[in-house]
Each structure stands twice: as structure tokens, then as C-alpha cells.
Image: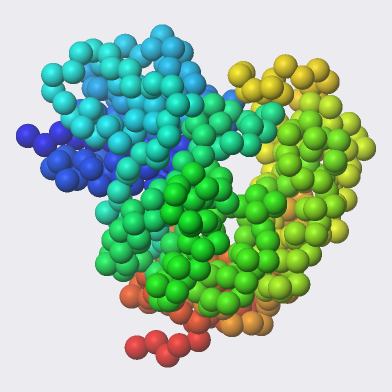
């Protein structure tokens, strides 16, 4: 009888890629994938630990699995499993596998082994890992775009961040394995691919292949001209003329960059151990905006970091208000045990933190709407991803990441179609298909 497998994924695009690899592995072993809300023989929770909230959600999913089937095997992996294995052991009564980030390639085989003891711990010392886990993916179920994880780990050790401790040092996927994976995606008919990693800008620096992120992106653009290529996130210090040359030189590299700022105050940036100044960040954004006037530029912002006074918070707000950025991802600072910042004095009061987050999120709304209005009346190439269940409208992202909805037949899904951006309605960009509908 086929084993029923349920998988839940929290956190970043790297986790989503890795869970897709688990799904591929279980399918190859003739297992039956079921929704996480359904009864299953094995529950896999791919956890996140980047915030306290993510850790809480990870624990909640474990409890849900235990309630759904007290006899099921619980397999917990990801960043929370890596840094909080002992906490998980205290709460789980079921047969348990805790698998660290450096051993995810062993997850499927371990989960399916009938002769396992009640407890299996495969966490290990992630800091000692020298190679990236091989995790091939056959397809992303229900998705039009594919994620391509080319790198794992981080060497930056920002003072607020648990990731270097949960993911280890920077490790890159060998170039041959990168292209093997892209070939799979091309055969499956994916029209867009998101290049992702924990710190993708460091790609190749640990390999003896004379390859870096810029040469890899150029090779991918050149070899796969029919596939749209998007970069998930890149550090400000890694945005340079070489990257902009690739973006302007290849029509299939999408005009969209996501760049973490975190703070617009030099004193706070130094306390965060971020390796740039406000002046450097401003120069990067201006260069992108000049080279790619249509580009969407997103930023991560961390509000309420220890020592952030009213002046520092206002510096961040005013900086972002005046820069040509298109949207913000705003997070309240979350105290993570094991990080340097957790021991800092001058922790910001929760209510003040909430006020700063609210103010930045209002700015995000204004920035998005201003960006959309700049493109009203234009034609956009949209990858049609799905049909909105409530409105019945098709929806997808333009090259520069505008989420357009429009009327059209279901057969347009998974195609790239020209859409005229007609209007904004309740802040939602709406358009009309510019091709003759059969």
C-alpha cells in the first residue's frame, strides 16, 4: 500500500525549492502526496526560524500533525529543526525524524525507511558542511514559475540573523548541476525561473570553476532565451556594472531586483553588521533606476532594531520615501536567541515597534500605487499563472512585477500574453488582453 505523505513549508524560496525536491523524491518512490490537513502516514514540516513568529508557526504545524494522526511519523527539517532540535524533542510524542539543513538530501530515504527507531536525529554541525545538498526537482506542482536554488548558507553574520547558524557557510551548486536542473525545467515547459539562494551574490566563490553569479546569469540568459529569468534577492554591495550589463543586454532577464536595506541610518547599519552605508545604498538604487527606468525595485526593511531611536527610524522612512523604490517588505525586529543582537541593550518597546512598522507599511502601499500609476496605459507582457477564484479573472505578473488581473479564457494559463494596463481599482491593477481571443 502506498504511504501517504503530507508536506508543509514555511519561509523562503529556498525552502520551497527544497520541498519541491522532497515531493519529487516521494513521487519517485511511489508514495501518495496528500494535503497537510488530511490523514497521512508521514508528515514533513520544512520549518523556518528567521523570526520568533516563524518558530511559533513551525511548532504549531508539528502539533497539527500530531493531532491529525498520533501514530504518524513526524519529519521536521529546515532552520528551526537545525537550531531548536531539543525543543522539538520535548514536544513530539510520535515517531520522530529531525533532519538538519545539511542532510536534507537524506530526508526522503529516511522518512520511508520502515525499520527506523522511534527517534532519528540527523542535524550534525552545519558550520562544517563544505558542499551544498544535492536536491534535484522534477517539477513545481501547480506553479507556472520554477525556483532554482543555486546557493545555500551565508558568511555575513548580520547581528540580528540566525541564518548563518542554521544554514552554515556559503556553498554553491556546481555549474553542471545548475544546468541539469534548468534542462528539467525547460522540458517541463516552465516559462519563468527565479534564481534563488540564501546569498546568491556569493555564488561560485567556493567552487574552482571560475564562475560567479554574473557569468552564470549571462550563461542562463543566453542558453534559454525563451525562459524569463528573475533574481530573488541580492545584496546592495553585489549590484554592480556587470549585473546591470546582463540585465540591460538580455531581454529575458526581468527588470526587477529585490535588495535588502534593513535600515536607512548608518549607526544602525553598523550595529546590524551590514557592510555598506546609506550613501552606497542610494548610489546603487540610482544606478538601477537610471539603467532600467521600468524596473521594479523592492527593499527589505527591519523596524525597531535595538538602539533605533526616533531619529534613526525617521532617517529610514525619509530615505525610502525619497528613493525610486517600488515596494517594501517590512518586518519588525525579532529577538533571536543565539544572535549577537539578542544581547544588545536598548531593545525597542513593542508598541513603538508596531508604530514604526505601520508607518513603513503605509509607505509601502503608497510606493506600490505610485509605481503602478507610472505604468498605467502601457502594454505589459504577463505570464498568466492562475485564475482568481473569487473574481474569475486571470492573473499574473508583468516583467517588472506588476500583479495584473484581466478577463480571458482559461487556456491562456501558463502563457505569456500582452496585457494593456487599463486602470487601478481598489489598488488592484486591472487590464485587458491585447490578443485576439479564439
**Which is nearer the eye, 272 or 373?**
272
Q: Is residue 298 left or right of residue 285?
A: left
Q: What's the image's color scheme?
A: rainbow
- State which quarter of the image contains the C terminus: bottom left
Rendered residue at 17%/45% (across/down): 28
Can you see residue 295?
yes
Rendered residue at 52%/34% (across/down): 169
Q: Position of residue 418 (x, y in %)?
A: 50, 82
Can you see residue 143?
no
Q: Residue furthest top?
A: 90
**Image-quadrant location for residue 32:** top left
Q: Residue furthest right?
A: 311
Rendered residue at 50%/68% (across/down): 218
Q: Position of residue 208 (x, y in %)?
A: 44, 49
Q: Is residue 327 left or right of residue 60?
A: right
**Which is nearer the eye, 436 or 306?**
306
Rendered residue at 28%/32% (across/down): 107
Amino acid at each position: 500500500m502506498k504511504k501517504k505523505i503530507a508536506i508543509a513549508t514555511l519561509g523562503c524560496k529556498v525552502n520551497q525549492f527544497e520541498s519541491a525536491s522532497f515531493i519529487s523524491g516521494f513521487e519517485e518512490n511511489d508514495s501518495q502526496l496528500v494535503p497537510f490537513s488530511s490523514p497521512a502516514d508521514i508528515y514533513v514540516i520544512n520549518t523556518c526560524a528567521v523570526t520568533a513568529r516563524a518558530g511559533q508557526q513551525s511548532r504549531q504545524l508539528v502539533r497539527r500533525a500530531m493531532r491529525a494522526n498520533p501514530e504518524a511519523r513526524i519529519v521536521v527539517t529546515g532552520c528551526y529543526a537545525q537550531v531548536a532540535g531539543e525543543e522539538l524533542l520535548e514536544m513530539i510524542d510520535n515517531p520522530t525524524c529531525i533532519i538538519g539543513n545539511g542532510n536534507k538530501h537524506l530526508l526522503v530515504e529516511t522518512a520511508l525507511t520502515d525499520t527506523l527507531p522511534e527517534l532519528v536525529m540527523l542535524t550534525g554541525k552545519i558550520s562544517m558542511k563544505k558542499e551544498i545538498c544535492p536536491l534535484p526537482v522534477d517539477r513545481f506542482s501547480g506553479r507556472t514559475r520554477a525556483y532554482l536554488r543555486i546557493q545555500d548558507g551565508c558568511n555575513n553574520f548580520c547581528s540580528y540573523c540566525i541564518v548563518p547558524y542554521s544554514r552554515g557557510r556559503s556553498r554553491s551548486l556546481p555549474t553542471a548541476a545548475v544546468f541539469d536542473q534548468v534542462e528539467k525545467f525547460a522540458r517541463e515547459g516552465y516559462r519563468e525561473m527565479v534564481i534563488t539562494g540564501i546569498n546568491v551574490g556569493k555564488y561560485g566563490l567556493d567552487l574552482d570553476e571560475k564562475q560567479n553569479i554574473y557569468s552564470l546569469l549571462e550563461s542562463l540568459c543566453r542558453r534559454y532565451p525563451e525562459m524569463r529569468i528573475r533574481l530573488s534577492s541580492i545584496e546592495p554591495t553585489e549590484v554592480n556594472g556587470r549585473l546591470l550589463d546582463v540585465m540591460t543586454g538580455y531581454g529575458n532577464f526581468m527588470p526587477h531586483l529585490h535588495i535588502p536595506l534593513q535600515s536607512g541610518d548608518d549607526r544602525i547599519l553598523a550595529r546590524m553588521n551590514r557592510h555598506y552605508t546609506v550613501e552606497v545604498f542610494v548610489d546603487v538604487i540610482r544606478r538601477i533606476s537610471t539603467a532600467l527606468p521600468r524596473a521594479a525595485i523592492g527593499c527589505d526593511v527591519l523596524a525597531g532594531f535595538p538602539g533605533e531611536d526616533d531619529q534613526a527610524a525617521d532617517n529610514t522612512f525619509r530615505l525610502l520615501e525619497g528613493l525610486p523604490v517600488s515596494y517594501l517588505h517590512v518586518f519588525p525586529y525579532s529577538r533571536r536567541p543565539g544572535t549577537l543582537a539578542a544581547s544588545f541593550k536598548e531593545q525597542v518597546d513593542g508598541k513603538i515597534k508596531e508604530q514604526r512598522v505601520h508607518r513603513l507599511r503605509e509607505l509601502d502601499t503608497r510606493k506600490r500605487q505610485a509605481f503602478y500609476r507610472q505604468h498605467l496605459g502601457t502594454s505589459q507582457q504577463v505570464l498568466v499563472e492562475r485564475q482568481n477564484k473569487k473574481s474569475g479573472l486571470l492573473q499574473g505578473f508583468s516583467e517588472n512585477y506588476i500583479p495584473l488581473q484581466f478577463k480571458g479564457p482559461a487556456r491562456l494559463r501558463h502563457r505569456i500574453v500582452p496585457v494593456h494596463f487599463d486602470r487601478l481599482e481598489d489598488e488592484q491593477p486591472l487590464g485587458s488582453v491585447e490578443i485576439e481571443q479564439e
